[in-house]
Image (spheres, rainbow, N blue to C red):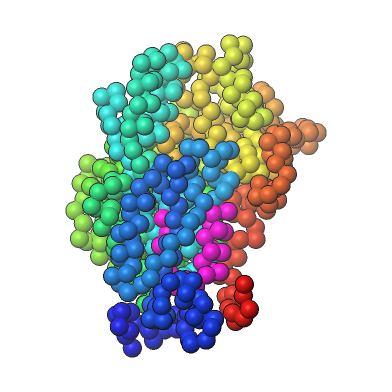
Amino acid sequence: MTSASGVGTDRPRRSRRWTAGTDETAMSHRVALRIGPAGQDQPVIGIADTSSALNPCHDGFAALLPHIERGIRDAGGIPARFPVMSLGEDLMKPSAMLYRNLVAMEIEETIRANPLDGVVLLANCDKSVPAAIMAAASANLPSVLVLGGARAAPEFRGRPLGSGTELWRALEDRRAGLLDDDHWARLERCLAGAGAGACNTMGTASTMAVIAEALGMCIPGSTGLPASGTDIEQIAYQAGRLVVRHVVDDVRPAALITQAAMDNAIRLVAAIGGSTNAPVHLAAIAGRLGLEAGLRRMDTLWRDVPMVVDVEPGGTRLIHDFRAAGGVAGLFRVLGSSLEPDVRAADGQPWSNHAAEIRVDEQVIRSPAEPVAPAPALAAVFGTLAPDGAVIKAAAASPELMAHSGPALVFDSYEVMRDRLDRDDLPVSADHVLVIRGAGPIGGPGMPEWGMAPIPRQLAEQGVRDMLRVSDARMSGTSFGTVVLHVAPESAAGGPLGLVRDGDRISFDLAQRRLDLDVPADELARRTPAAPPAAATAHRRGWPRLYREHVLQAPDGCDLDFLVAPGPGPEPFVEPVVGRS
Ligand code: FES
């Protein structure tokens, strides 16, 4: 049967538990939704609106909302926008990551508690996209993500400015005395002039966009769109239409995000030279669905996937170029049998269909035979310093440091590191291994992006551009260098990182996937672990306390232990409306 709106009604629709009928309960709920009696035949589509003046990466969503709403209405649905906390990477301290799970929980519970049949999720900045997918996976109602597009690239130092990456480069140059105040001020003007949208390199936001698209959570072709203009407006409109179709066809996230789709996503992170944050988020998404995405599985899947996408920070171009060169469909084409082709995109088509139709510019999306960087682009390492694993972006590391052994120079926290790093009397050589601890999920708290310690000034001035760095922190997806991250267990959870002392030898061997602390076990047993930094325990109330008490380590996605179980919570009891004031 089809209603006057054209939307099929045979399938019992969730919102009808609230809105269908002639009694006072249904009437009251229809009044609250402002839909009238005819509205009970239409699906109600939530729009999780993460617009915020505190998050410039989400600035463009206000302009997209009318297009999403029009798409929902044209397909026969009823749009219902609701606000959601916005995770802005620039301003939230100590890290937006501290709040990723809170936003996932907020969206999931808003969906569960309200008469929604499907949802459009607005997400663009680094943590917003995984939070939205985690929420969608747990609520498991038909869901489509709308990404907010990438920011523009004004010219700086003679080339288009890659957000994030150019700032890191300029910072290193400034510390080495190569960038004067005029250029520094010009950089600020360029960054400010780039406008709304996500970082335009293959940082975390772009990496998560590729993942979202590959998992079937957003319209094919979404990744790398400019943040404004008719292309992204059209995608927003299509997303509105698509989510209503998903409701009619009962297409849910758990049916799209299969183990095969997850394995594809893991491989794609390597193919794009993606952010080291992605393994953490993928593990969290997998955990919500009962899928497997442990570090050993990831390392196996990464082993034969070279980096084929020539986009910064590992390459030379920007995310707009990736889209123009074929985007995610182009990746499926060049990677061929390395990926599972029958996994479905959000429009229901297998990715093999999209791959067959796309033209690829192999200057930007290269053939695996002529990659940007050889496999592996990412790797997981294990050893006496990281019993549960750690991650390195090999594609952004220096070949001469891929096997390195040197004395540790230990910083007990990021603050201590910033305080000591530029002192003239810092006892450091290029051979040293810089260790930052107290920066993990518990220690940060929230595992801030502190892992890429700057090169000590005295070495930067001598021309040193890279050193082996080891930490329990994350680093920005736009960063680069030989940086081993996410060491687990973290020092604040009793990991061996907390036992390292200045001068201890640390050995790293990428080929062997090893990270070892070369100190006898009996000596380590005599040592007292470093105390967590004061910041780890200073906040004794509210969300940070709940987070600290329940957060899992990086290989498990830094989710909260009580959010991992697959499947949505129970449907709420829809009570009679009697005597409500
Ligand atoms: Fe938001 Fe980079 S800071 S996407």
* 321, above or below 130, in the image: above
Q: Is residue 55 left or right of residue 443?
A: left
Magenta span contains residue 114? yes
Residue projecting furthest to the right: 526
* 73, above or below 286, in the image: below
Task: Tell me residue 51's x, y (percent).
Answer: 43, 50
Magenta span contains residue 368? no
For the point 61% across and 30% down, the residue is 414
| Front residue (pair 224, 152) | 152
For the point 67% across and 24% down, the residue is 502
* 526, above or below 46, in the image: above
For the point 27% across and 29% down, the residue is 155
| Front residue (pair 315, 14) | 14
Q: Quadrant of residue 150?
A: top left
Q: Can residue 117 be seen here? A: yes
Which part of the image, by quadrant, shows the C terminus? bottom right
Task: Tell me residue 339's x, y (percent).
Answer: 35, 59
Q: Can residue 255 be seen here? A: no
Q: Quadrant of residue 505?
A: top right
Task: Tell me residue 404's x, y (percent).
Answer: 53, 29
Which part of the image, by quadrant, shows the N terminus? bottom left
Query: Which segment did they paint magenta?
Result: 101-122
Q: How many marks?
A: 0
Q: Is residue 468 left or right of residue 377?
A: right
